Amino acid sequence: MSAEAITPAPVAPLWGELRYGGELAALLADRELHAPRRGRTSAQPVLLIPGFMAGDRSLGVLARWLRRRGHRVAMSGMRLNVGCAGRLLGGLEAQLDSFSRHCGEPVFLIGQSRGGSLARALAVRQPASVSGLVMLGSPVLDPLAVSAPVLRTVRLLARLGDVGLPGVFSSDCRDGDCCAGFEEDLLAPLPAHIAAVAVHSRSDGIVDWRACVDPHAEAVEVRSSHCGMSVHREVYRVLERTLDA
């Protein structure tokens, strides 16, 4: 967490997250975005990392779109992103290194919400293996700048971790050694060669959008729900521009 946490402010109404279905329908109806791009010879390999309490399946639409564009895509291997960030990063670092070596080039990272924060830490730790980074609604300036219902869920999961539920972060992760490096990585400058974009939405019903404005990345605002950022037309146009730069 940053030295100065984000000043508390009302997060957009949670009911705004009900837009997800409409956002997905609008994306699927956009023929231009879903047309295969023939003749592409320089499509970067991409590693996708899902958000808090989500798994790789939540990024299935995005993965299929990327493959149609000619990108080689690797998933995080997460069924549910609720583990200790420090331990998750160890596995992701090994996966990134392996995927980059297999492709013979650096990898572009795309992460949603907490997945974007993990992706940022990967970029700081393994800069030679990363070509670019897009964070979708990722509260890197303050990981706990979230709506009250989500914060209650975080605390509940931490209590479950405290009593020994495997695969779940615990209260110790907030101030313990396991995640100290991760918190530093969220605020560290990004290497100059990594093109980084931080996407935020003022109508985000889960995360305080101000916590997503990474000072070391290009800030891009969209009109999206939090959960819908992985299926929103505006986000896909941002991805097109960034991936093709």
Image (cartoon, grey):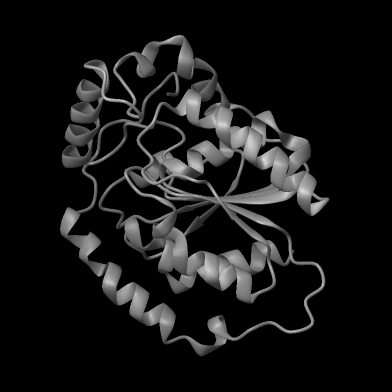
- Whether residue 209 appears in this view of the structure is yes
Quadrant location of the C terminus in the rendered image: bottom right
Please identify the quarter of the rendering in which residue 73 is found. bottom right
Q: Number of numbered discs present? A: 0
Residue at image coords 35%, 35%: 82
Residue at image coords 34%, 13%: 172
Residue 81 against residue 236 in the figure, above or below: above
- Whether residue 235 appears in this view of the structure is no
118 or 73: nearer the viewer: 73
Coordinates of residue 68 in the picture (x, y in percent): 62, 76
Coordinates of residue 63 in the picture (x, y in percent): 53, 65
Coordinates of residue 100 in the picture (x, y in percent): 75, 46
139 or 83: nearer the viewer: 83
Residue 231 against residue 196 in the figure, above or below: below
Coordinates of residue 219 in the picture (x, y in percent): 54, 51
In the image: residue 136, left or right of residue 129: left
Quadrant location of the N terminus in the rendered image: top left
Residue 151 against residue 20 in the figure, above or below: above
82 or 102: nearer the viewer: 102
Residue at image coords 18%, 54%: 14
